[in-house]
Image (cartoon, helix red, strand yellow):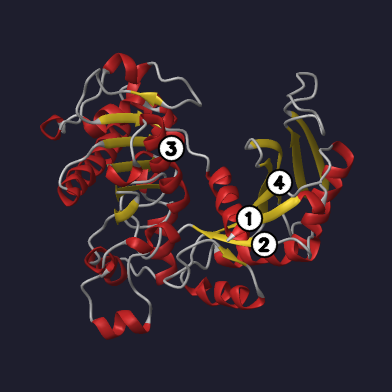
Amino acid sequence: MSAQQVLVVNSGSSSFKYQLIDMADERVLASGLVERIGEELGSASHTVRFAAGAGEPSPAIADATHRRETAIPDHTAGFRVMLEAFAAHGPVLDPAALAAVGHRVVHGGARFFEPTVVTDLVEINIDELSVLAPLHNPGALQGIRAARAAFPDVAHVAVFDTAFHQTLPPAAYTYAIDREVAAAHRVRRYGFHGTSHKYVSETAARFLGRPLDELRQLVFHLGNGASVTAVDGGRSVETSMGMTPLEGLVMGTRSGDLDPAVLFQLARRADMTTGDLDTLLNKRSGLLGLAGVSDMRDIQERRAAGDAAAQLAFDVYIHRLRAYAGAYIAQLGGVDVVSFTAGVGENVADVRAGALATLAFAGVEVDAERNASVRRGEVGVISPEGARVAVLVVPTDEELEIARQALAATAA
């Protein structure tokens, strides 16, 4: 059996998601979630997408989900639960058929600028970079170690969210603070959602039948976390998230851009600690802080009911999107393609229309009928016929992008 499958693992501190992808035709064979790791009772779900060994989906068993509750004390035990699910419900997970195991790692700092085959030294580096992503890198490392133990003879590849943004020029990634302090503590813009921005910008170019290296693109990744990236010729040249995923756009629970002096004021006048401020900006701000709900669907429902707080939250959200769009078009010297992706970007027509409503001067326009009739799961054009700038909705697929990069890294 030729090795043509990739197992993609996205691991956090108390859970991990996985997909098994047949790279011969890029089909998802199975997916799952193992969660509540370390709690008294863990849970796992395993979804079989196709019959094992069959060439076509079987309607009788496609998308059959199997659930289980059991003690899952650590990630190693979680991988055993995953392997048991494959053995019990299929498809066959044969290590000999695995070309690679691809791992999502949030922060690669300035050290990792491409998908990297995991070694003991790479593990040490990921661990050291945990200071920049304490909520993410430790969980990813636990998943990598458990996976390497489960599949010791398979290549493991780390794919970093920050890697796509390593092409940012110094003027874009440098903060204007004391340079010695910045260097000592690795303070600079790193950017995130890179896997999604790369996938979407390349998919948009293929869809349009145009060379990637000739396109100036804006990609809006709008989910609970949100970022926008300026992509020039396939290279990230500006991105809204910074040293951490807190900077930039308004998000579900994150504030995005904020005058740093606000923190001094709250520390002095409200006696808020560093931990309090971290919680405020990351978990109690954004849409949640403004309107009491973090989901854009709830914001839309409340707006429709006349809720003033929800309307203000929406207006602030749109205002920030327009500000970044205008700034990035200026940095690019114009734009050829604008794409929306992720949960909000793919599904909320009002956000797409609002974000671009004032950009006709740059050739950016949205056709209301097309915008309202985008088909879920498909690339859709929402700009008018013959428009100078193509405006698209492009469903992201970060797992497939990780699988592609993992496969390429093992072939290099």
Q: Residue at x 23, y 81 (%)?
A: 178
**Residue type of the residue flagged with mark 2:** His
In this figure, which residue is indicated by the disc labeled 3? 203
Q: Is residue 313 left or right of residue 64?
A: left
Distance from disc 1 to disc 4, alpha carbons, whole Å, reads: 11 Å
Q: Is residue 160 left or right of residue 213?
A: right
Distance from disc 2 to disc 1, alpha carbons, whole Å, reads: 6 Å
**Secondary element at tag 3:** helix
Distance from disc 2 to disc 3, alpha carbons, whole Å, reads: 25 Å
Q: Residue at x 63, y 67 (%)?
A: 141
Q: Residue furthest right?
A: 88
User: Are circles 2 and 1 on residues that touch, CB within 8 Å?
Assistant: yes
Q: Residue furthest left?
A: 361
Residue 190 coordinates in the image, percent (x, y): 37, 64
- Up-down relation of residue 249 to residue 354 (above or below): below
In this figure, which residue is indicated by the disc labeled 1? 102
User: Are circles 3 and 4 on residues that touch, CB within 8 Å?
Assistant: no
In this figure, which residue is indicated by the disc labeled 2? 156
In this figure, which residue is indicated by the disc labeled 4? 5
Distance from disc 2 to disc 4, alpha carbons, whole Å, reads: 13 Å
Could you tell me which quadrant the C terminus lies in? bottom right
Q: Nearer the viewer, mark 1 or mark 4?
A: 4
